[in-house]
Image (cartoon, grey):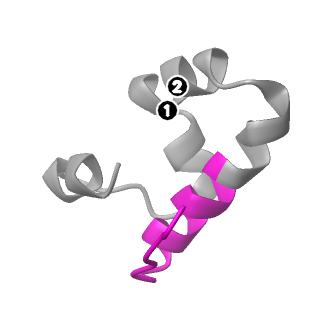
Amino acid sequence: MKKWWETLDPKPTNIEEAQELPEVKKWMQQIPDPVQLNFLTELEDILDGFDTVRFD
């Protein structure tokens, strides 16, 4: 998702705008409900410029 985010121009400036992107809407429909919170948290981190590393 980070690589996709880097290709966006212009980038959304807040989580609400990011959630309205067609790709994000599509992914949210495909992700099980319990995992959606993790997805949104990761999206917010990317939006805020945090570079997280996952080891799972």
Q: Position of residue 12 (x, y in %)?
A: 41, 55
Q: Which residues are magenta?
A: 39-56
Q: Position of residue 25 (x, y in %)?
A: 55, 24
Assign a secondary structure to mark 2.
Answer: helix
- Three-letter amino acid code of the residue under disc 2: Trp
Give the residue at x 44% y 68%: 46
Badge 2: few (under 14), some or many (20 or more) residues near its Cα, within 10 Å? Answer: few
Q: Are marks 1 and 2 in contact (CB under 8 Å)?
A: yes
Q: Position of residue 5 (x, y in %)?
A: 28, 53
**Residue at the front extreme?**
56
| Residue 49 or residue 18, whichever sits in front | 49
Residue position for label 2? 27
| Residue 25 or residue 33, whichever sits in front | 33
- Three-letter amino acid code of the residue under disc 1: Val
Answer with the quarter of the image where residue 49 lies: bottom left
Q: Distance of mark 1 from mark 2, alpha carbons?
A: 5 Å
- Seen in the picture, residue 21 relative to 43 is either above or below; the reply is above
Residue position for label 1? 24
In the rendered structure, the answer to whether residue 11 lies left or right of residue 6 reads: right
Give the residue at x 14% y 50%: 7
- Seen in the picture, residue 10 relative to 50 is either above or below; the reply is above
Question: Which is more foreground, mark 1 or mark 2?
Answer: 2
Q: Is residue 54 magenta?
A: yes
Assign a secondary structure to mark 1.
Answer: helix
**Residue at the bottom extreme?**
50
Give the residue at x 35% y 48%: 1
